[in-house]
Image (cartoon, helix red, strand yellow):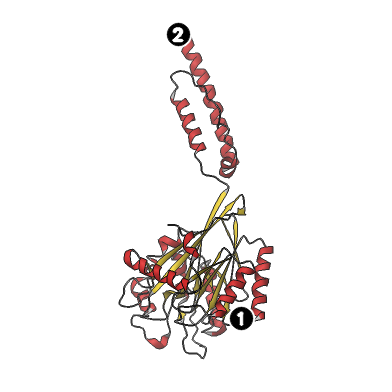
Amino acid sequence: MNAWIKGRNAALLCIASIFLFSCSNAADRGVEEVLAAPNELAGQTIEHPPLPSPIDKMVIASASAKQAAPNPNEVRITISAAGDVTLGRDENYGYAYSFDEEAKKHGLRYFTKYIEPIFKKDDFTTVNLETTLTTSTRKASKTFRFRGHPSYAKILTYGGIEAVNLANNHTYDYLQKGYNDTIASLKKEKIGYFGRTLRLMKTVKGIQVGAFGYEGWSNTSTLRKQIANDIRTLRKQGADIILVHFHWGVERSYVPNSTQKVLGRFAIDSGADLVVGHHPHVVQGIEEYKGKFIVYSLGNFMFGGNKNPSDKDTFVFQQVFSFQNGKRTAKKEIRVIPFRISSVTTRNNYQPMPLAGGEAARVKRKIVSLSAKIKKPTWTAYEVK
């Protein structure tokens, strides 16, 4: 009897050793290779000795867990876009209740309290940076000139914002020195930037994401050639997703003008995958065009340029791009997340906050209604929670 037990235990020990050796080799090959390999146990009948030992049970459980693993060949990239971000103020409009005062009182993380949980769960977030980050005092001769301390670039890091558009009418408010200082501040925080002649390419989960930015005041042949050339160039460099920002339109106008519509559609025709806009300081509608989306105006977001705008509505636009075995699928998923630019209603405290309940529903209805002024809002069919 003792001999039979010893023989059985020896056999089980041998089986366990084989499994452990196999698992060890699998670990050495790396997680991706293991997940991508076909499940060798699927469809096979596993014979077990009577009264299986704890080692046998462990092996069976391990095989079941392997069968339940998600498809490793699908990659999902969530891109978020938000509107005008002015980290600072115009000194002509006083210090009280300004962005600078809030920063001194509460610290830099204060501004990102409500956006961090959203943006740090996505894969790539972009905004329009409508300010300079500089200590320079030489200003441009214009009505509004925005400036923030170079340390304010840390707010972008805290908020989970990976890249910013610089093609707008405020990046040179403090002339070339202010622009250069802004670039240096972004580089220090490893924040990507793009706009005008600057292109951005970023690798996200093995997928190449490209971004451009333009000032779209006029529909000129020069601008159209640049857009087409930029998109063609990044495609040749391997871009899988191309995002285009436009600073365009008319301030406080809720409906895109003809130039916006022509340029947005031209960018899609030229190969862009998503177009987002800003400058009106209020939201405009969304258009589905040839299966892709044009977000005409995201409105303000973290906007230090106005202490108390009458319209504080804004939103974050998210799109999920899906890839199977490295190739884009036809799957379309979007989210429109209603926001207010301030966590209080009496003024602007520069702390963007997602809305809930009736207020979220109101802003959502507003966006759908404004979209209907462009064309039938078919984009709502692709919304996910």
Q: Is residue 195 visible?
A: no
Question: Which residue appears at 54% of the width and 83% of the height?
Answer: 172
Question: Which residue appears at 59% of the width and 57% of the height?
Answer: 207
Q: Which mark is residue 1?
A: 2
User: How many numbered badges does the structure rendering display?
Assistant: 2
Q: Is residue 147 visible?
A: yes
> Amino acid type of disc 2?
Met
Question: Which residue appears at 47% of the width and 89% of the height?
Answer: 143
Q: Nearer the viewer, residue 384 or 26?
A: 384
Which residue in the structure is indicated by mark 1? 219
Residue 16 x %, y %: 52, 26
Residue at disc 1, secondary structure:
loop
Quarter assignment of residue 103: bottom left
Decide: few, some or many residues near mark 1? Use Cα within 10 Å; few <14, some 14-19, many ≥20. Answer: some
Q: Relative to residue 140, is residue 44 depicted above or below?
A: above
Residue 196 x %, y %: 60, 76
Residue at disc 2, secondary structure:
loop
Q: Relative to residue 112, is residue 307 depicted above or below?
A: below
